[in-house]
Amino acid sequence: MYGLTMVAVAVVFCVVWFYASSRGRLLGAEVDHATLSRTYRSYLLGPAVYGAAVVIALFAPFVSLCIYARARGVLAAARDGAAGLDGGTVYGCRHANALC
């Protein structure tokens, strides 16, 4: 059940992000196309990783548990690297390093 919840959260997050960023609706003018493209790809990792963990849980629950334990940090690092986060402001928002 946890895995399915994480898949749903990741999918909804992607939908919200894609809506907010499509056609430059809610992003600042300083966001370039290359950064936006990298961010899109990194956000698609969430549903894929959590979905794979759900399938793996059917055969190897402990391995799936390890994936869930590591997924947040790995996905956050992919997101931060794609968005070019350096502890400053990105898209007009402060990045909370304490949460990663």
Image: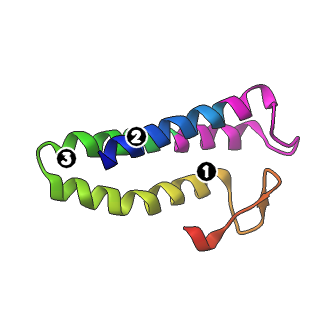
Q: CA distance from mark 2 to mark 3?
A: 13 Å
Q: Is residue 13 magenta?
A: no
Where does the magenta region start and end?
19-43
Q: Residue at x 57, y 40 (%)?
A: 13
In the rendered image, the vertical position of residue 66 relative to residue 57, given as above or below:
below
Tell me which amino acid carries mark 3: Ala
Q: CA distance from mark 1 to mark 3?
A: 29 Å
In the rendered image, residue 6, in percent from the top left (x then y), is placed at 41, 46
Taken as a whole, is the magenta stretch helix, strand or loop? helix
Which residue is the site of mark 3? 57
Q: Is any atom of residue 67 visible in this view?
A: yes
In the rendered image, residue 18, in percent from the top left (x then y), is placed at 64, 32
Q: Nearer the viewer, mark 1 or mark 2?
A: 2
Q: Residues within 10 Å of mark 1 (few under 14, many from 20)?
A: some
Q: Residue at x 48, y 42 (%)?
A: 9
Snapshot quadrant of residue 38:
top right
Tell me which amino acid carries mark 2: Val
The residue positioned farthest toward the right in the image shown = 29
Q: Residue at x 72, y 34 (%)?
A: 20
Give the quadrant of the C terminus.
Answer: bottom right
Q: Residues within 10 Å of mark 2 (few under 14, many from 20)?
A: many
The residue positioned farthest toward the top in the image shown = 23
Give the secondary structure at mark 2: helix
Give the secondary structure at mark 1: helix
Q: Is residue 20 magenta?
A: yes
52 with respect to 38 (left or right): left
Tell me which amino acid carries mark 1: Ala
In the rendered image, the vertical position of residue 25 relative to residue 83, given as above or below:
above
Which residue is the site of mark 1? 82
In the rendered image, residue 21, in percent from the top left (x then y), is placed at 72, 34
Which residue is the site of mark 2? 7
42 or 68: nearer the viewer: 68
